[in-house]
């Protein structure tokens, strides 16, 4: 399995970028994040088995697979959110721009600012909309003054497509927004600390179709500015928003490639079965 | 399979007699439960009302005193003192030099005869001094002052005295009156029930509570936060958790013995002081704050922690920016309960010597002090009947203290409460 992965990956990514954005070939030649031979254990139980994957700057990468296949676990390894679980143990190597994120000299706090995360359930702080966005820049000292902070808040909300809806009520509680607005607020909050990668863990699973469509539109717009990884249960969503898709099954990476290839012409039998709804 | 279940199971008769009986039974159970709940509420409300009525009814009389009028011809008895003597910085000294006690005694003798002094409370003459300082002009004229009668007359006038005292009251009928006992709010403990006051004990309680809060709150909150957010889950922390839970259940007198052994005997801190009292009560209050604090911290949704960690907040920032503010209302609830218990605590303070006769209010944490519940306990033990209503009055003061303290804590809690 692993051999297969190795041979397939580089050619795939080059192919893909050639087709989509030929001008950026040089940039995508060095992926934003790389994972090699990653194993994750929860106590004795192995949740992830030898996963190797590259995440590129100019594409949205989707992780799909049945429940419990380890896609969320793997996602949470990419900004070391798994550190909060005492029994979790990670082997292998994950690099952000060539730096090993599990190296002892890597500062976890800074890593999480560089690799932001959006969670399954919208989780705004029970503070004002303004403070929700301003919190990250404040703790990282990203703003030089009040006006600078105001600007960061406005631009983050604008990028998240929420500015028009909330610009007159920035002092209202973030929890008073609707579910979809809350999730966009969370995305704006992640953008506010100027991350390089944004990880999204099923960001639409708690939202209605209209709010989902808005988030998907937002992901389209953010593509290219940030490397985006999205975990989703919804295969149509993966097909709509992503350029690359990884199919996980029972803790292993079964197949990774261009989204169009995965959905129209999967290499593996298991992928085909899952995509056609045979199991999942 | 399907046909088998269909044949063996009779169709459910939703309208049948059994079903109707079941429904009626269910309604009856609901009604019974509601009635029992209402009865329980009514019973507790009744007890509370009874307690308050009795307490306020008896206690109110403790705030009043029976007074006798006394005419003092100041120019004659003082030998021509001028008002200017009782103004400025030397006023107190001049007043003492004047021999006020003798002046009052001789005035009493003029008005009430040789035995007259026995009608007045022994310390009552100080009230004349206060009057002079209040209005120095009074020494240039004849004036009538109202002085407290003896405790026996006071009790008899309020309708609960000995036959001898009632005889005195009959003789003095028409002269006796009731006035508000300001001394009760400003004096401290005394041997004469007419002269006792609550101020010393009140101040002692206040200082003790401040010491308790200053120690128990930060230590309790930090312990709760550390145990919930930082401490690894292992045998040692399990042991600590069990110990804290047990500590909260230890009888309070044992904390008193601990305070005696550790703070007084080992550290040699001053006996009877608010410092030792506060430390002892803090030991007792801390476990309550730790337990409620841990529960409050535990109930902060993990999604908030993840959100903060996810944008790169350090564990410390997560705790102090997000977890603590959200847990604060719960922590304050526990603090209210713990402090209320500490305020009402008597037994441990008896062990560390806070049951002494304290006639001067404490001015610092090391001065000998007593607290309200101990004062109540001491007065309730007195033989003199005059102390009965003083005890009730002190209880009212204690309850008011408690009420104000709780109101403050609830106000703070509501201010910090986050609306989701």
Image (cartoon, coloured by chain):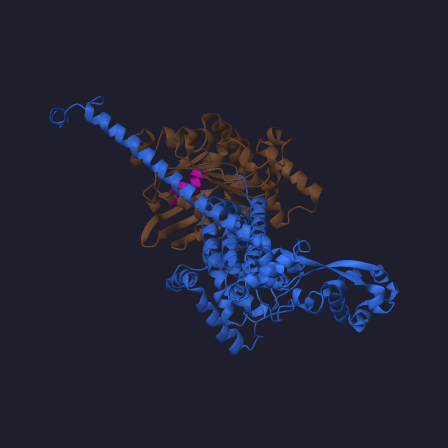
Chain colours: A brown, B blue
Q: Position of residue B16 (x, y in %)?
A: 20, 22
At a point 74% along the width and 69% down the height, the residue shown is: B105
Horizontal side of A77 relative to B166 (left or right) equals: left
Q: Position of residue A250 (x, y in %)?
A: 31, 43
Q: Position of residue A5 (x, y in %)?
A: 37, 43
In this rendering, the count of numbered labels is: 0
Question: What predominant SS class does the magenta segment belong to?
Answer: helix
B332 lies above or below A203: below
- Quarter of the rendering occupied by the N terminus of chain B: top left
Q: Which residues are magenta?
A: A6-13
B296 lies above or below B189: above
Q: Relative to the observer, which residue lies in front, B48 or A145? A: B48
Horizontal side of A150 relative to A62 (left or right) equals: right
Horizontal side of B115 relative to A230 (left or right) equals: right
Q: Quadrant of residue A134?
A: top right
Residue A224 is at least partly visible in this image: no
At a point 45% along the width and 67% down the height, the residue shown is: B253
Q: Relative to the observer, which residue lies in front, B249 or A73? A: B249
Q: Quadrant of residue A260?
A: top left
- In the image, is residue B88 part of the stretch drawn in magenta? no
Residue B418 is at least partly visible in this image: yes
Q: Relative to the observer, which residue lies in front, A52 or A229? A: A229
Q: Position of residue B270 (x, y in %)?
A: 58, 75
Q: Relative to the observer, which residue lies in front, B34 or A146? A: B34
């Amino acid at each position: 399995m692993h051999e297969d992965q190795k041979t397939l990956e580089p050619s795939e990514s080059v192919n893909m970028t050639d087709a989509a954005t030929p001008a950026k070939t040089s940039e995508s030649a060095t992926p934003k994040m790389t994972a090699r031979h990653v194993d994750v254990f929860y106590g004795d139980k192995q949740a992830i088995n030898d996963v190797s994957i590259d995440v590129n700057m100019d594409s949205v990468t989707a992780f799909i697979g049945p429940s419990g296949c380890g896609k969320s676990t793997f996602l949470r390894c990419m900004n070391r959110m798994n550190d909060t679980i005492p029994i979790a143990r990670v082997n292998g190597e994950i690099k952000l721009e060539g730096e090993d994120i599990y190296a002892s000299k890597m500062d976890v706090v800074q890593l999480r600012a560089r690799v932001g995360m959006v969670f399954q359930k919208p989780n705004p702080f029970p503070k004002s909309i303004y403070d929700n966005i301003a919190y990250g820049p404040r703790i990282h000292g990203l703003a030089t003054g009040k006006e600078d902070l105001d600007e960061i808040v406005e631009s983050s909300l604008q990028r998240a497509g929420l500015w028009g809806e909330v610009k007159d009520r920035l002092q209202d509680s973030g929890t008073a927004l609707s579910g979809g607005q809350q999730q966009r607020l969370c995305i704006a909050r992640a953008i506010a600390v100027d991350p390089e990668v944004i990880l999204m863990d099923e960001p639409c699973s708690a939202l209605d179709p209209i709010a989902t469509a808005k988030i998907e539109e937002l992901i389209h717009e953010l593509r290219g500015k940030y490397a985006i990884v999205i975990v989703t249960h919804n295969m149509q969503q993966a097909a709509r928003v992503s350029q690359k898709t990884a199919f996980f099954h029972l803790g292993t990476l079964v197949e990774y490639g261009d989204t169009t290839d995965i959905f129209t012409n999967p290499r593996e039998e298991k992928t085909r079965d899952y995509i056609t709804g045979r199991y999942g | 399979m399907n046909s088998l279940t269909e044949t063996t199971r009779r169709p459910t008769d939703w309208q049948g007699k059994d079903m109707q009986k079941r429904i009626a039974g269910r309604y009856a159970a609901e009604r019974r439960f509601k009635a029992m709940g209402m009865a329980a509420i009514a019973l507790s409300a009744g007890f509370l009302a009874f307690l308050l009525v009795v307490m306020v009814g008896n206690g109110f009389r403790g705030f009043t005193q029976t007074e006798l009028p006394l005419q003092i011809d100041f120019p004659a008895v003082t030998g021509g003192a001028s008002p200017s003597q009782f103004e400025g910085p030397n006023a107190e000294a001049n007043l003492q030099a004047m021999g006020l006690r003798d002046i009052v005694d001789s005035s009493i003798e003029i008005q009430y005869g040789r035995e007259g002094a026995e009608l007045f409370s022994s310390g009552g003459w100080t009230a004349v001094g206060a009057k002079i300082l209040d209005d120095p002009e009074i020494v240039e004229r004849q004036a009538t002052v109202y002085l407290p009668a003896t405790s026996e007359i006071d009790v008899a006038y309020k309708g609960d005295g000995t036959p001898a005292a009632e005889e005195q009251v009959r003789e003095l009928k028409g002269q006796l009156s009731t006035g508000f006992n300001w001394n009760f709010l400003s004096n401290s403990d005394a041997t004469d029930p007419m002269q006792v006051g609550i101020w010393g004990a009140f101040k002692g309680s206040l200082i003790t509570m401040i010491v308790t809060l200053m120690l128990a709150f930060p230590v309790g909150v930090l312990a709760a936060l550390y145990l919930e957010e930082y401490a690894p889950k292992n045998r040692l922390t399990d042991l600590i958790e069990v110990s804290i839970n047990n500590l909260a259940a230890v009888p309070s007198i044992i904390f008193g013995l601990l305070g005696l052994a550790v703070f007084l005997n080992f550290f040699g801190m001053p006996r009877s002081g608010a410092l030792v009292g506060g430390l002892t009560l803090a030991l007792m209050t801390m476990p309550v704050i730790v337990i409620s604090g841990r529960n409050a911290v535990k109930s902060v949704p993990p999604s908030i922690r993840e959100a903060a960690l996810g944008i790169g907040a350090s564990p410390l920032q997560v705790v102090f920016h997000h977890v603590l503010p959200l847990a604060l209302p719960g922590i304050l609830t526990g603090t209210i309960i713990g402090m209320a218990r500490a305020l009402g605590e008597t037994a441990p303070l008896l062990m560390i010597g806070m049951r002494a006769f304290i006639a001067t209010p404490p001015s610092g944490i090391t001065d000998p002090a007593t607290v309200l519940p101990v004062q109540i306990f001491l007065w309730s033990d007195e033989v003199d009947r005059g102390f009965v209503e003083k005890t009730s009055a002190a209880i009212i003061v204690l309850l008011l203290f408690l009420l104000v303290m709780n109101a403050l804590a609830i106000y703070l809690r509501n201010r910090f409460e986050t609306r989701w």
